[in-house]
Amino acid sequence: MRLLFCNIAWLDYYKGIYKGVDEPVGGGDYVKKTGNAHEKYNFEVVEIDNDSEQYCLGFVETKKTKTNRNQLHIEKINGCELAVNEDQVEEVLVIYCAKHPAHNFTTVVGWYKHATVYRYYQEMGFPSSEPDETEIYIQNYNALAKAKDCVLLPRRERSLYSKWSVPRRTSGAAYGFGQSNIWFASEENDLLDKFLKTLVSQINDYDGVNWLHEYPKI
């Protein structure tokens, strides 16, 4: 199965930043310095070019050089090895993860099924949905999926360590996120195989509350 794990800042709703109500936590130096996070709209449902479908546009930060952001190496996704000269791949399960602000573990916050993943950032402009902004917001994204294939877990659900926790090699695990915000889950490891089988099954079987259409109470 084509899997991509993405580490992003924590927000409850990912519908923009609502000061004092829903602000990003974690996600690196940029978030700490600016109070902003490019992934703030990852679970905002949008329409594209009068298409009858609705979509979500997902952002994850790739490594940077002094002049630009590096590409997302889509050819490292299992099953996409031949895409070394392609700019996008289809049918990827993108799993968004963040460090829980109240507990010391990384957890799944949501996912896109049947996603298109792009090597380089794409751009799309939208009117800002944040209460104090009126200008057009240019959203960078490197994953796109139909809204009907996207799930944002409620905060309480994300707090279930035994169900949604994702390991980090920096904490001594044999597999999981390293220093990068991208994890391709391609290690040859029997424990990893068991972990992925369980996690994907839980994603496919999930029929609980979806916060995709929920907004902060302000």
Image (cartoon, grey):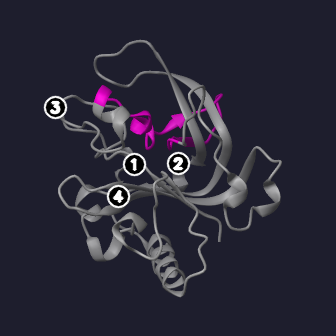
Mark 2 to mark 4: distance in Å?
14 Å
Mark 4 to mark 3: distance in Å?
21 Å
Q: Where is residue 196 in the image (x, y as percent from the top left)?
A: 51, 76
Query: What's the amino acid at mark 2?
Result: Ala
Q: Nearer the viewer, residue 159 or 183?
A: 183
Q: Is residue 117 left or right of residue 104?
A: right
Determine if the magenta segment contains residue 83.
no
Label 2 or label 4, whichever lies nearer to me, is 4
In the rendered image, the vertical position of residue 160 relative to residue 179, given as above or below: below
In the rendered image, the vertical position of residue 168 relative to residue 218, given as above or below: below
Q: Which of 28 and 133 is in front in this view?
A: 28
Quadrant in which the C terminus appears: top left
Query: What's the amino acid at mark 4?
Result: Leu
Q: Which of marks 2 and 4 is nearer the N terminus?
A: 2
Quadrant in which the N terminus appears: bottom right
Q: Mark 4 points at which residue?
A: 153
Q: What element carries label 2?
A: helix
Q: Mark 2 points at which residue?
A: 147
Mark 2 to mark 1: distance in Å?
8 Å
Q: In this view, does 60 lie to the left or right of 16?
A: right
Query: Quick check: marks 3 and 1 in contact, CB under 8 Å?
Result: no
Query: What's the amino acid at mark 3?
Result: Gly
Query: Quick check: marks 2 and 1 in contact, CB under 8 Å?
Result: yes
Q: Where is residue 163 in the image (x, y as percent from the top left)?
A: 33, 75
Q: Name the residue under label 3.
A: 20
Determine if the magenta segment contains residue 47.
yes
